[in-house]
Image (spheres, rainbow, N blue to C red):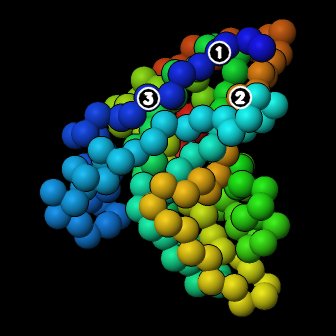
Amino acid sequence: MQRIGEFEKVSLKQFVSSWEKIFNHTTEEINHIYEQIKLPFRATNGSAGYDFFTPVAITLSPKQNILIPTGIRVKIENGWFLAIVPKSGLGFKYRLQVDNTMGIIDSDYYYSDNEGHIFVKITNDTNENKLLELQAGASFCQGIFLPFGITYCDNATAIRNGGFGSTSK
């Protein structure tokens, strides 16, 4: 296996800033949530995906969604990206969706002002009226490292700063 990346936590300052924009927790609660963040890992030697874990308990009614600041960033070798997709079992049982269908974490996102903080927005898209309940620390999505190529005439020189839509500005 080729080793091409490494997961890290974002700084506490970055996590607090991101978390406060979405959730209503005290500073003490946010510090505790940050301390409990688990870095993604593969469950077995043959697993392609690195499991990402919920920082807090999550309950989603049918058709409800949530934006999750994972507290995670990833350093990736050039020529690779991290694809974020739902856990297979949750997709099968709840039609759990990653709202942008597949998250793409580019290698240069690591250097953004937000420290490359990975956010994942998910929806419980069940057709069977099932309530999705995940305990804090439950795996909910997975990241898969994939290589990519470029065209012969590619001359991209821009430098990324930001997440969604930042490369088209």
Amino acid type at mark 1: Ile
SS at mark 2? Answer: strand
Image point (17%, 64%), residue name: 26
Q: Are marks 2 and 1 in contact (CB under 8 Å)?
A: yes
SS at mark 1? Answer: loop
Residue 48 percent coordinates (x, y): 77, 34
Task: Tell me which label, 2 or 3, sits earlier in the chain.
Answer: 3
Per the model, the C-alpha gap separating discs 3 and 1 is 14 Å
Residue labelled with disc 3: 8
Image point (79%, 85%), residue name: 127
Amino acid type at mark 2: Phe
Amino acid type at mark 3: Glu
**Residue 116 seen in the figure:** no
Residue labelled with disc 2: 145
**Residue 21 seen in the figure:** yes
Residue labelled with disc 1: 4
SS at mark 3? Answer: strand
Image point (31%, 47%), residue name: 34
Quadrant in the picture for residue 95: bottom right
Camera-side residue of 17 and 164? 17
| 150 relative to 38, above or below | above
Of all residues, the one furthest to the bottom in this rendering is: 129
| 6 relative to 38, above or below | above
Per the model, the C-alpha gap separating discs 2 and 3 is 15 Å
Picture mark count: 3
